[in-house]
Amino acid sequence: MNIVVCVKYVPDATADRRFEADNTVDRVGVDGLLSELDEYAVEQALQLKEKLGDDSEVTVVSVGPDNAGDAIRKALQMGADKGVHVVDDAIAGSDALGTSLVLAEAIKKLPHDIVLCGMGSTDAVMGVLPTMLAERLGLPGVTFASEVTVNGSTVTVRRDGDTATETIEADLPAVVSVTDQSGEARYPSFKGIMAAKKKEVVTQSLGDLGISGDQVGLSAAWTAVEGTEARPPRTAGEIVKDADGSGASALVEFLASKKFI
Amino acid sequence: MAEVLVLVDHVDGAIRKTTNELLTIARRLGEPSAVFIGSLSDDATAALKQFGAEKIYSVDDADIKGYLVAPKAEVLAQLVGSASPAAVLISASVEGKEIAGRLAVKTDSGLITDAIDVQAGPVTTQSVFAGNFTVTAKVTKGTPIIAVKPNAAAPEAVDGAGAVESVAVSISDAAKGARVTSSEPKAASGRPELTEAAIVVAGGRGTGGDFSAVEALADSLGGAVGASRAAVDSGWYPHAFQIGQTGKVVSPQLYIANGISGAIQHRAGMQTSKTIIAVNKDEEAPIFELVDFGVVGDLHTVVPAVTEGVNQRKG
């Protein structure tokens, strides 16, 4: 089975994330890494391959600047077989529609029985890319899977929603996004890190995918950010130390003063 | 004035509050037209009229039930084609965002998700990077499709004409590729829905696994219960109640964090709450940087005492 995993290189959520002068996310000046939520997708891909026990292959695809290669490399270290890195200056500033267009064209060129994604990125957190990808590829899409099982030509997914736990079945090929409940992602082993050095990463440009530069990027985006503003820091609040119930009384007073009681 | 389509969020015909919020926002942008997918009852019609729906497109779902979102996106795409609306508003729920994503591709339109405010233009406001930035944005191509978060507007009751128009739609086979084969409803807690609640009381690692005190405080205040990832990963509380980057993002009037240290991933889910209170043993816990009021102390004694105090005041 041909398993494709989409990964994103994102600014580290624990770093001081910011915007560039053109209101795009600063993806170069802030340390980045493989989006934590995509590690779960890589993990599910590897588990699928292990369960099938055949000559299944896991291909990692990423769209992003040069340093996005680090995200692909991490997935290869975890155990994925090969990588595709779409990199082109003209892609910079693309919104979800633009990125999904590029990803979809890259995936169309690969054999794919299942396309796995994380539930969302840790930077933009829209969570719509898997669905857009499914729509662009003309495939069924199932998002927020907490369990993924492949049986012949169908994929079965468990989804824990707010009001119900659902079992969803889709015909393959399909696009599936997985949550952080799907299973802890493995750490790369030393052997995995060494092996990854020899794995192939194909670099592709927009031209290779038959996309012209004016179809994507900041100027062609379907949305425009008009302004960004840092949230003013919260003003320091009152902190009391509890002694024999004084903390609780003070808290109740505070709730009453704010009219929550 | 152009129509603004609002996809009605309902549970078996009962209209959810988020729909009233969307109708209120729609009025700022044009004439609200509700799109109801399901079997439209007189009660539902009246409820939609009450919050200003001028038109109600009723789409029978007999042919759609049991499939995931793709058919609903096709319904909306057909309506976008026939009504040429000024915008389409959808709740920013898991399902809503999926529909919005497919609709955006189908209609070659820009999509903005998780708007916390929408004004004429439409110009949207979003809270990003764990609530550290606010961003204003606009759709520049196609029909603006906007997924709006709960509590983005105070619902305003305005009598609308509520003219019902039945819409026949044809759904492609391709849209039926994903089927729901079983659905087990979860037991209702009787508490407000987490993302819509005005008050949220959350528990973390410090609870040691016993959420009864947290739940009792939530109930005394009429709030919802949430949990940190540490508590959910320990199996102490269901994932549906997780607050943070990989769970729910809440922005209530009051947030009370009990035994939660306040890691960045958690802050991403609650930082924009209006008033924040924390109870934690560790005075160095980063959550105290965010609070309006904090108690350094053992939540096992402080929280029950607060609950008692609240109940007494309520008389």
Image: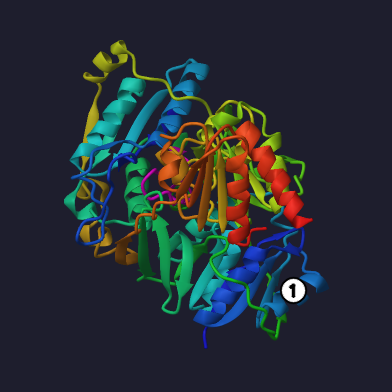
How far across and down, in percent of the image, does residue B120 sit?
44, 79
SS at circle 1: helix
Question: Can the viewer see residue A167?
Answer: no
Q: Work out whether residue B225 or residue A102 is closer to the camera in this orientation and state it.
A: B225
Residue under the image location 58 percent in, 32 percent down:
B298
In the rendered picture of this protein, how many numbered marks are placed on residues?
1
Q: Who is closer to the viewer here, A183 or A131?
A: A183
Residue B45 pos. (x, y %): 76, 75
To which chain does the residue with label 1 belong? B
- Up the image or down, B37 lies above or below B25; here it is above
Is residue A30 depicted above or below A202 in this figure? below
Q: Is residue A90 visible?
A: yes
Q: Amino acid at mark 1?
A: Ala
Residue plotted at (36% across, 67% down): B137
Circle 1 sits on which residue? B47
Q: On the rendered structure, is B202 left or right of A165?
A: left
Please indicate whether residue B272 sits to the left or right of residue B233 in the image. Answer: left
Q: Is residue A218 above or below residue A85?
A: below
Q: Is-magenta flag for residue A122?
A: yes
Drawn side of residue B28 relative to residue B315, left or right: left
**How is colour applied across the structure in the image?**
rainbow
Instruction: Tell me the chief SS of the magenta region.
Output: loop
The residue depicted at 37 percent of the width and 20 percent of the height is A187
Residue B211 shown in magenta: no
Q: Which residues are magenta?
A: A117-131
Coordinates of residue B9 in the picture (x, y in percent): 66, 62
The one nearer the camera, B109 or A150, is B109
